[in-house]
Image (cartoon, rainbow, N blue to C red):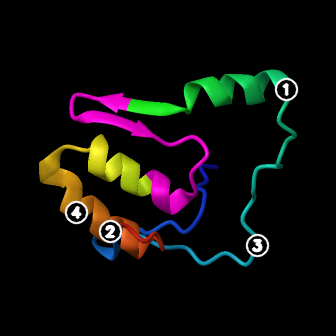
Amino acid sequence: MPYTYGDAVLPCDVVDYTIEVDEPLTSPTPRAVSDVSRQIGERVADFIVSEQGTAHIWGHDADEQANQIIDNVAHPDARAELRDAGRLLGFSPH
């Protein structure tokens, strides 16, 4: 069964059928992060690079990471839409 992290939003116009079920949704079991995985993550997640620029995201909170990605990595034509989507998800993009 597929799952999402956080609040998932699904537009009603893309739903054909719904089935009410009285069972809890399954969730993945959290696993401990190994030292090797942590070291890889530290090196991989420091920067995001695109044709538009570079976002330094390591060590920043989620709001600042979102701002870095939108301001420095996203295509300029998509930035306003990404800010609006971020606000709907609870981020505070400037």
Position above or below: 67 against 39: below
Q: As shown in the figure, which amino acid type bears the numbered disc 3?
A: Glu
Q: Would you identify the image quadrant in which residue 62 lies?
A: bottom right
Give the spatial CA distance, label 2 vs label 1: 35 Å
Residue at x 48% of width, y 74% of height: 90
Dot placed on the residue nearer the N-terminal end, 1 or 3: 3
Residue at x 68% of width, y 22% of height: 40
Residue 78: x %, y % from top left:
19, 53
Position above or below: 64 against 19: above
Tally the marks. Answer: 4
Position above or below: 50 against 56: above
Circle 3 or circle 4, nearest the eye: 4
Give the spatial CA distance, label 4 vs label 1: 37 Å
Q: As shown in the figure, which amino acid type bears the numbered disc 4?
A: Glu
Q: Are marks 1 and 3 in contact (CB under 8 Å)?
A: no
Could you say whether the residue bearing mark 3 is in a helix, strand or loop? loop
Circle 1 or circle 3, nearest the eye: 1
**The C terminus: image quadrant:** bottom left
Which residue lies under the disc numbered 1?
35
Q: Residue 29 magenta-drawn?
A: no
The magenta-colored residue range is: 49-65
Residue at x 28% of width, y 51% of height: 71
Q: As shown in the figure, which amino acid type bears the numbered disc 2?
A: His
Residue 42 relative to residue 14: left or right: right
Give the spatial CA distance, label 4 vs label 2: 12 Å
Which residue lies under the disc numbered 3?
23
